[in-house]
Amino acid sequence: MDNFEKKCAMIIREICQRCEKSLSENYIKSWLKSCIKLGEKKALFALGEIYKKAKQGYMIPSIFEFEQLAESETEPSLQIAERIVRGMQLFGAYKNEEAKEYVGELGWKIVQNNGGWQEMCYTTNMNHIYYVKKDLQKQIKIIKKEIKLL
């Protein structure tokens, strides 16, 4: 068992403890196979989401539901939108390279679709930041759907 598998097994067992449920070793092995199939990033994202909800009485999702969660969205659109806005505050209009690294690949696509980094920095009204984030979230969701269709 490599480090990734050990980490997943540990999280799965912690989820079981928090929910006061027990899973057979065979079922845990099935979960681990699913984690390997999904890859580290997706698997750890989904396990993290389940872990956040896990408490007494929580029904541990099936492996199918776990895989659906992992495939649904590896990074919530709100987090990407918040990184774009925070990047404008941190880097200003002239530190494009730092901003590009900070907002990530998908965030940068959104920036490019909105005229580029300088344009976004100059035209974004920070007094209406709630609406800016909502608009960015919508754009991110559209891009994600387009990527899935390719």
Image (cartoon, rainbow, N blue to C red):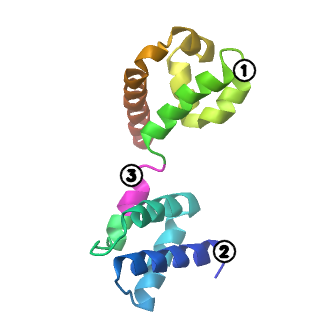
Q: Secondary structure at mark 1?
A: loop
**Rendering coords of residue 124 (x, y %):** 49, 13
Q: Is residue 117 left or right of residue 132?
A: right
Q: Amino acid at mark 2?
A: Asn
Q: Secondary structure at mark 3?
A: helix
Residue placed under numbered mark 2 in the picture? 3
**Rendering coords of residue 85 (x, y %):** 53, 26
Q: Is residue 94 left or right of residue 30?
A: right
Q: Residue sitting at 42 percent across and 81 percent down?
A: 17
Nearest the viewer among 58 and 147 is 58
Is residue 150 visible in this depiction of the protein? no
Q: Amino acid at mark 3?
A: Ser
Q: Which of the two marks, 3 or 2, is nearer to us in this view?
A: 2
Please rate how many residues cluster around mark 1, counting C-alpha atoms within 10 Å: few if below 14, some from 14 to 19, many from 20: some
Residue placed under numbered mark 1 in the picture? 95
Q: Which of the two marks, 2 or 1, is nearer to us in this view?
A: 1
Q: Amino acid at mark 1?
A: Lys
Is residue 16 visible in this depiction of the protein? yes
Sooner in the amino-acid sequence: mark 1 or mark 3: 3
The correct choice, above or below, for 107 with respect to 51 in the image is: above
Residue placed under numbered mark 3 in the picture? 72
Q: Is residue 72 magenta?
A: yes
Q: Which residues are magenta?
A: 67-74
Q: Residue sitting at 71 percent across and 15 percent down?
A: 94
Q: Is residue 60 magenta?
A: no
Residue 96: image quadrant is top right
**Rendering coords of residue 1 (x, y %):** 64, 82
Examine the residues drawn in magenta and state their main secondary structure: helix
Q: Which of the two marks, 1 or 3, is nearer to us in this view?
A: 1
